[in-house]
Amino acid sequence: MQNITTKLKKLFYLWKRSQVPLKQPIKISRIDNLIIFLICILISIISSYKLLLISPLNITGIFSWLWTFTEVLISSWILILVSQKENPTISSRQIIFVISLLLAVQTAKLTLASTISPLSMIIPPALIISQGMGSITALAWVSIASFSWPDQSVAINNNLFFTILICASVVSILGGRIRSRAQLLQLSIFVPIGSFLSQWILIGQDKVFFVNKKEFIFANGDIFSDSLLLAIVMLFTILFIPIFESIFGLLTKARLLELADKEKPLIRRLSLEAPGTFEHTLLICGLAEEATRMIGGDIDLIKTGALYHDVGKLHAPNWFIENQDGSRNPHDEIDDPMRSAEVLQAHVDEGLKYARKNRLPKQIANFIPEHQGTLKMGYFFHKAKEKNIMINENDFRYNGPIPQSKETAILMLADGCEAALRAMNINASDKEALQTISKIIYSRQKDGQLNDSNLSKGEIFLIKRAFLNVWKRIRHRRIQYPKSKNNTFS
Ligand SMILES: [Fe+2]
Ligand SMILES: [Fe+2]
């Protein structure tokens, strides 16, 4: 009996350890909530009001309207929940964008259903959503846009409906993975070809008019012109994606890869003016990438975020140990721990200024304050204590916020471990390296820095293993930092 109790206790302990810490959802202002609600109501009205116009209107008609209205309202709400689940840092602007696209499509179905093929109405928005918000949000959007038809009199051919669903789903899935504009162009050519072939097989060859001068493009039902129009609309959509990116703060894979280009002026400046920080950044990229791969996070996001996390050090590169040659340390010269702490905080504040100036997306700029969280600047705090200055511990802590996503949390852990791993003896064993990593990660956990990150205990375990793997790879070709007691402020 006692054995079972012990086992149950152990199971309960393991289950508790694997749980994700509770995190407050992103707050949306009242005004934004009201706007989102009104758009959802508008979508429901547009999708259902025609049912009220059927005469004579009887009780069944009213119930049918009420049913459709509620169904669309609930579907829109589910869409918002899905987008929030897939994008934990989603802004109200982006939610408004997703449901506004739904509103636009429902309106287009009402006004243009008899002239434009539904393929060209549903697939291009699915491409934008999958690129900016991910495949699952795009699939949720596609299912609502495909199943809800406001005008009952427009009969959708089952085969056409099937083609729309398949093509839009393919675009949603591939769109979320595509990593370059060239691949997007390929998609905008192959999807219309696919839609043409599937309609040809399913709907029939008699509807193919290769040359129909009268209604070449806007001839609904003409398979060739419908597919051609789809290709044109998709090409235009690709042209407009960068505009949506900047207006709604969307972050596509292509944009992430563009930003990760080391020839970008800010990164180039970092490599020239703060070479030590640049090296530190590259090493962190390796650690963070491996850890993110282990837990199944967004690798492109963390690689780009890591590249920009310390750009603020450009404001005073020689105040940071990795850029010092060992001969001169400005912190020793001023001998003022408070002032030194201000310089360290400035690398976050200045970094945010660089991010604004260079129009970095919010998701990338978030790495700048969150990689430091509200960590204590231990070295200068103790120095101030030694000098018996009346101090408040909070003056020696970064302003935060603490990491709000798994990716920024991984970067904080990689940032903490990098200097320690570099400074480790070349003959150190794997066990010693793992102990060092665990110690640093535990100190961050104990300090509450990971509370909002959504990282589970199991994922933290995987991150430790990933850091160890990278350490094993780099230990033979690493460059040691000058051994200095100041290495706590990198
Ligand atoms: Fe930093
Ligand atoms: Fe750093």
Image: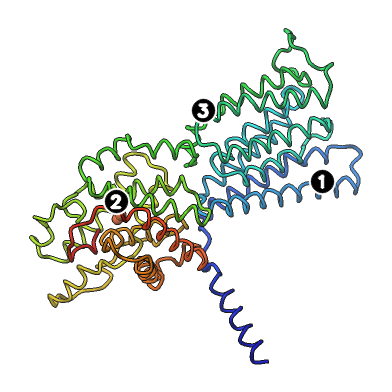
Amino acid type at mark 1: Trp
Q: Which mark is residue 477?
A: 2
- Residue 245 or residue 209, whichever sits in front: 209
Amino acid at the residue labelled 3: Ala
Residue 482 image point, x, y percent: 18, 58
Q: Residue furthest bottom?
A: 2
Q: CA distance from mark 3 to mark 2?
A: 36 Å
3 or 2: tag closer to the N-terminus: 3
Frontmost of labels 1 and 2 is 2
Secondary structure of the residue carrying numbered label 3: helix
- Disc tally is 3
Viewer-side residue, 280 vs 408 = 280
Label whose residue precedes the other's in the sequence (1 or 2): 1
At mark 1, the secondary structure is helix
Q: Is the C-beta separation of discs 1 and 2 under 8 Å?
A: no
Q: Determine the secondary structure under disc 2.
A: loop
Q: Is residue 111 left or right of residue 320?
A: right
Circle 1 residue: 65
